[in-house]
Image (tube, rainbow, N blue to C red):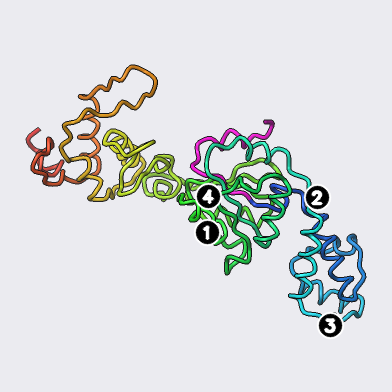
Amino acid sequence: MSNPGYLATTSYHAHVFDFDGTIAETGNLNLEALCAALANAGAVVDVEWLRTEPLTSIEAVRQRLRRERGVILACSNSAIHQMGRAYWMAHTADLRPVAEVMAIIRSSAVPMAVASANDTQVVRAGLAALGLGQAFGAVVGRDEVTRPKPHPEVYLTAAARLGVAAPRCLAFDNTDDGVASALAAGMDVIDVRTWNIHKPESERNHDGPSSPRAHVGHPAERSLQQHGRWGTWADTREETAYAIQILAYTGVAAVPDQTIEFLSAADDTAHPPLWIAKDPYCPTAIVEAAILAAIRLSGQSAKPHPNSRFPRTHPDSQAGAA
């Protein structure tokens, strides 16, 4: 892959793609579909006329026809939209994929979704024409949200349907509104026009311990499991301890009580080795020390537990005795 953003895709839990201009080159087909719909409505225009101004909505085209050509359309915007959609779906064979994005989709090992400013039915038809009908766990179009891009709703909805927190997703888009939408959702986003990766304000403005970076999109969050625990495959006390230490060093002081209870609870079973396909050995003493350090760094005392191995006092309560 030649694009510089590709290497960044490997550390995320999900990929969320725009459709028009990102997965497929749809610009010409979109304009041709509108031309066909307008012709059916009694207004003959060509694609080049439509290109001369941004195509923001059917209503904007209606007003432009009235202003520039004195044409008043008798049918509704909805009727024009339906005719255009019918033309588009009858010509999906004309779609051409964006090669670099297709390569990422084909090689992705994480769940994927589409978050589009087009209609869901149209997007699904386009995906099917490109051989991607079964590739995505969720497809969200503009008809399924109340606020279009640049509002983050479409990206947030796509992430929610995948069951992945938005900051753990990497988005791909090709418009300013789309990039803004993904950033507002808390996602890192690759602008496929330049292959530059953009990060939310909370990450770009990381100035120290008070930065919200540790709360949204921090790398330590990407293996977060439910109930305030961490783990790559399942939650473990060892990985939870390491995550708490990382977050403490980056300025996160508040650690959920349930996390401390999990760390403090007695565990007479061996810690699972974190290295797979190597000797099943775990340095238990080091892991126990990491757990104690995480509790101390959290600023909380170990929660009472009848079989806990850890002290019940606040970590700072014996500071004077040292």
Q: Residue at x 43, y 42 (%)?
A: 222
Q: Position of residue 126 (x, y in %)?
A: 72, 53
Q: Is residue 258 shown left or right of residue 218?
A: left
Label 4, label 3: how many angstroms apart (C-alpha)? 43 Å
Q: For mark 2, give the secondary structure.
A: helix
Mark number for residue 157?
1
The amino acid type, in three-letter code, at marker 3 is Ala
Q: Position of residue 253 (x, y in %)?
A: 29, 47
Residue located at (46% from left, 49% from top): 164
Q: Which numbered dot is residue 187? A: 4
Which kind of residue does numbered mark 4 sit on? Met
Instruction: Tell me the CA gap for discs 4 and 2.
Output: 32 Å
Quadrant of the image containing the N terminus? top right
> Disc 2 designates what residue?
93
In this rendering, which labeled residue sits more in front, label 2 or label 3?
Answer: 2
Observer-side mark, 4 or 3, equals: 3
Residue 200 placement (x, y as % from top left): 52, 50
Residue at the disc numbered 3:
74
